[in-house]
Image (cartoon, rainbow, N blue to C red):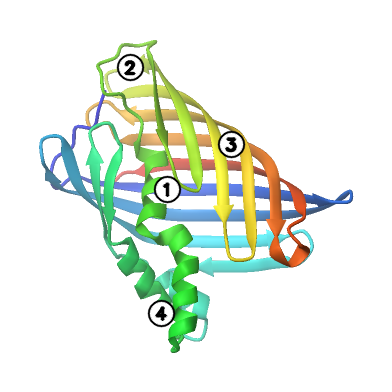
Amino acid sequence: MQYKLSPGDVFTIKQDANQIIKQEIDGATHEITNTLQGIMEFRVKGDNNTVYDIDVMFKDLNLKMTSSIQGELMNIRARDYEEDDAQSKIFNSLLDVPIQITLARTGDILEVSGGDSLVSKMANASGMKDDFSLNMMKKSLENDFGSEALSSSYEQLTYLYPIAPIEVGDSWNNEYTGKLQAQNTWTLNEITAESAKIDGKALVIMDIVEASSTMKLNGTQDSSVITDITTGFVKKMTVRGLAEGYTTMTQMGNIEIPTSIESTIIYELIEN
């Protein structure tokens, strides 16, 4: 079980994600719902025996954030470019910009390049002129679109396979790091002429440090994956997770606020 790709192969993945964040203070609950719909293209550029060189780009990205207290906080459709909307311009600027990844045959992402240039392009699209504001914008965007952040995000989709040969019923372990750290146990449940079915269970740690808040959570994650038996690429993947812990905010004197995040992410291959 491994990736078997060829230069010129193109894989288009649709991503649908739903995340519910709950925070409680003195019996009162604040709930934030984040939804994301995205389309990513993976284009194989080279095969270097043990690794693949792949260009990855966002073809579309829609983001929506709502609060149970404040209502709609964000609603961005990156393809619907609006000249007078800074957020629209920022996210429109990331579309069709290739990021280069080096992918091991196990799916481990060994290197990502281009994320920092992408962050600079997005910050410049904001229209901000002074260096201080631009640098603050870059720091914020790096959390989600810098090379390290993108590597962790892509690995959730790609890092599936063991180093050694396996048979149906076998299990193996791997892990990835970043804002979401996961220790995964995978099991090969079924192989047919066209597909392989893999299930995964993981212990996860979320350690998210931002300018005004810190979130520390622990939890579990269950994955159900169907991959193409010929290429090894994902045909469909569903990831469900629940993590609990606390958030501290500097403006509230670093009081620990009980916090939970429940998420569902679905990746699906679109036929080109």
Disc on res. 191: 2
Considering depth in this image, is 75 or 21 the residue closer to the camera? 21
Q: Quadrant of residue 212?
A: bottom right
Badge 3: residue crowd in 10 Å (few <14, some 14–19, many ≥20): some
Label 4 – label 3 distance at C-alpha: 34 Å
Report the disc number at residue 216.
none
At x 17%, y 39%, the residue is: 51
Say which label, 1 or 2, has the lower sequence index: 1
The residue where tag 4 is placed is 125
Sequence-earlier tag: 4 or 1: 4
Residue at 30% in and 42% down? 109
Compared to 71, does 48 lie above or below?
above
| Nearer to us: label 2 or label 3 | 3
Kindly check if marks 2 and 3 are in contact, taking CB atoms under 8 A apart as contact: no
- Residue found farthest to the bottom: 129
With respect to residue 167, does 31 lie above or below?
Answer: below
- The residue carrying mark 3 is 241
Q: CA distance from mark 2 to mark 3?
A: 26 Å
**Residue 80 in sight from this viewpoint:** no
**Residue 130 location (% of width, % of height):** 45, 88
Tell me the kind of residue under disc 4: Ala
